[in-house]
Image (cartoon, rainbow, N blue to C red):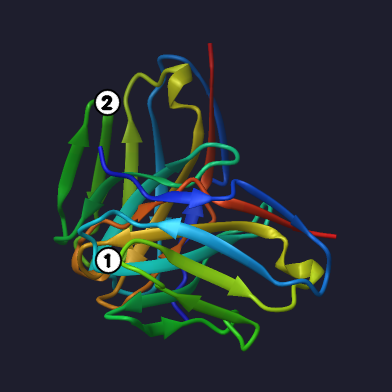
């Protein structure tokens, strides 16, 4: 069964360092997303990406964040200068169509980012 | 702001009992998805409901979307220890994003 894969599973970084989280969405999907979940809190939307550009982003997704689809398969989230409060599980997701239309969004296993 | 409130937040019952958990909002959603999440893992999709009043069954799990598409419920019949986990509802509104509830943490005791 096709699945969304994320690497690494766990990333530890020093405050102020740049990190890149990587995702390989399901191959025929067109919409790609990043969500995050701070320990014990809700899953929160960060950004959606369609047709090689950001289509929607949340207030969390400030200038320190960027996304890229460098080739036909990978989808990355970059945090330029990490802060302690960026520590969270980051989930990549993909869907064939808009989730609000009833299309399922499939999530990866997540990358646990720990900023020290 | 679209909010989804799930209740109860925690539920612990004995194996074999039935249970219902709820997902409520003051906003209308065009679809609602239920996920199950294990510790340290990503949400795994269980079902999507789209039509007001829609009922979907997945073995012992029954999902219902409210007539006004503002609420949903998940009913589990004869709960088993394998049903233990965090159940999340997430609403879509034709927009790009899903809005998640805070989850119901379910524990089924043998």
Q: Is residue B46 above or below residue A100?
A: above
Q: Is residue A62 above or below residue A70?
A: below
| Mark 1 or 2, closer to the camera | 1
Q: Residues within 10 Å of mark 1 (few under 14, many from 20)?
A: many
Residue A43 visible in the shown view: no
Q: Residues within 10 Å of mark 2 (few under 14, many from 20)?
A: few
Q: Is residue B59 above or below residue A66?
A: above
Q: Quadrant where the C terminus of chain A lies?
A: bottom right
Percent coordinates x, y for residue B98 in the rendering = 38, 67
Question: Does residue A42 appear to the left or right of B58 in the view shown?
Answer: right
Please give the count of numbered marks on the rendered protein.
Answer: 2
Percent coordinates x, y for residue A21 in the rendering = 57, 62
Q: CA distance from mark 1 to mark 2?
A: 25 Å
Question: Which of the chains bears the disc numbered 2?
Answer: B
Label 2: state its secondary structure: loop
Q: Residue furthest bottom?
A: A63
Percent coordinates x, y for residue B65 in the rendering = 24, 55
Tags 1 and 2 both on a single chain: no
Where is mark 1, residue-wise?
Answer: A99
Percent coordinates x, y for residue A1 in the rendering = 25, 37
Where is mark 2, residue-wise?
Answer: B60
């Amino acid at each position: 069964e096709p699945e969304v894969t994320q690497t690494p599973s766990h990333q530890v970084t020093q405050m102020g360092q740049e990190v890149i989280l990587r995702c390989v969405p399901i191959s025929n999907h067109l919409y790609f997303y990043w969500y995050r979940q701070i320990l014990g809190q809700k899953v929160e939307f960060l950004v959606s990406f369609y047709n090689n550009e950001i289509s929607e982003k949340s207030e969390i997704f400030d200038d320190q964040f960027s996304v890229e689809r460098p080739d036909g398969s990978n989808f990355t989230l970059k945090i330029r200068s990490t802060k302690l409060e960026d520590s969270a599980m980051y989930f990549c997701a993909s869907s064939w169509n808009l989730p609000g239309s009833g299309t399922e969004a499939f999530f990866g296993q997540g990358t646990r980012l720990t900023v020290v | 702001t679209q909010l989804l409130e799930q209740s109860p937040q925690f539920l612990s019952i004995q194996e074999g009992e039935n249970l219902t958990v709820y997902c409520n909002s003051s906003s209308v959603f065009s679809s609602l998805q239920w996920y199950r999440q294990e510790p340290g893992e990503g949400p795994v999709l269980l079902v999507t409901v789209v039509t007001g009043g829609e009922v979907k069954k997945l073995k012992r799990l029954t999902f219902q979307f409210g007539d006004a598409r503002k609420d949903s419920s998940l009913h589990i019949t004869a709960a088993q220890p394998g049903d233990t986990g965090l159940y999340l509802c997430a609403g879509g509104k034709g927009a790009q994003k899903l809005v998640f509830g805070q989850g119901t943490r379910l524990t089924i005791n043998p």
